[in-house]
Amino acid sequence: MTLNEQEPVQPKPHLKLVGTDGNAFAIMGAAARALRKAGRGDDVRAYQAEAMAGDYNHLLAVTMKWFEVD
C-alpha cells in the first residue's frame, strides 16, 4: 500500500455494478453516490484518488476493496 492509499472504514457500503455501464466514469460515479448514501461523503475523494492511480483493472480492484459489490 502506498502513502496515497487509505484503508476504507468498515462496514463496506453496498454497490450494485451488475447491469450498469462498465466504463470507469460510470463506476466511479456509482461509487461516489453509494459512499454519500452511506453517510461517507468525506471518503469520496480518497476513493477516487486511489481508484484513478492505475488502469481499469486497478479501478475494479480498488472498488471491490472499498465496497460490497454485486
Image (cartoon, grey):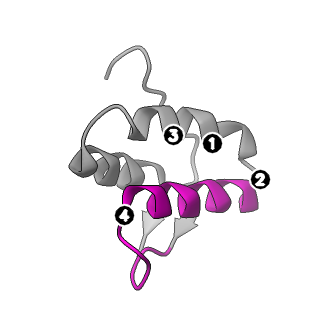
Q: Position of residue 53 (x, y in %)?
A: 35, 31
Identify the residue shown where x is 43% and y is 26%: 5
Kindly identify which numbered label has been placed on residue 68. none
Q: Is residue 56 left or right of residue 48?
A: left
64 part of magenta stretch: no
Range of magenta residues: 16-38
Identify the residue shown where x is 26% and y is 50%: 56
Q: Is residue 50 left or right of residue 40?
A: left
Identify the residue shown where x is 29% and y is 50%: 61
Along the viewing direction, whichever of 13 and 21 lies nearer the viewer? 21
Q: Which mark's residue is nearer the viewer, 2 or 4?
A: 4
Which quadrant of the figure contains the C terminus?
A: bottom left
How packed is label 1: few (under 14 Cα within 10 Å), some, or many (20 or more)?
A: some
Along the viewing direction, whichever of 58 and 6 lies nearer the viewer? 58
Q: Is residue 31 left or right of residue 68?
A: right
- The residue sitting at the top extreme is 3
Residue wearing tag 1: 44
Identify the residue shown where x is 61% and y is 35%: 45
Kindly identify which numbered label has been placed on residue 39. 2
Cα separation, mark 2 vs mark 4, equals 25 Å
Residue wearing tag 3: 48
Which quadrant of the figure contains the N terminus?
A: top left
Earlier-in-chain disc, 2 versus 1: 2
Q: Position of residue 60 (x, y in %)?
A: 31, 54
Cα separation, mark 1 vs mark 4, equals 18 Å
What kind of residue is marked 3?
Gln
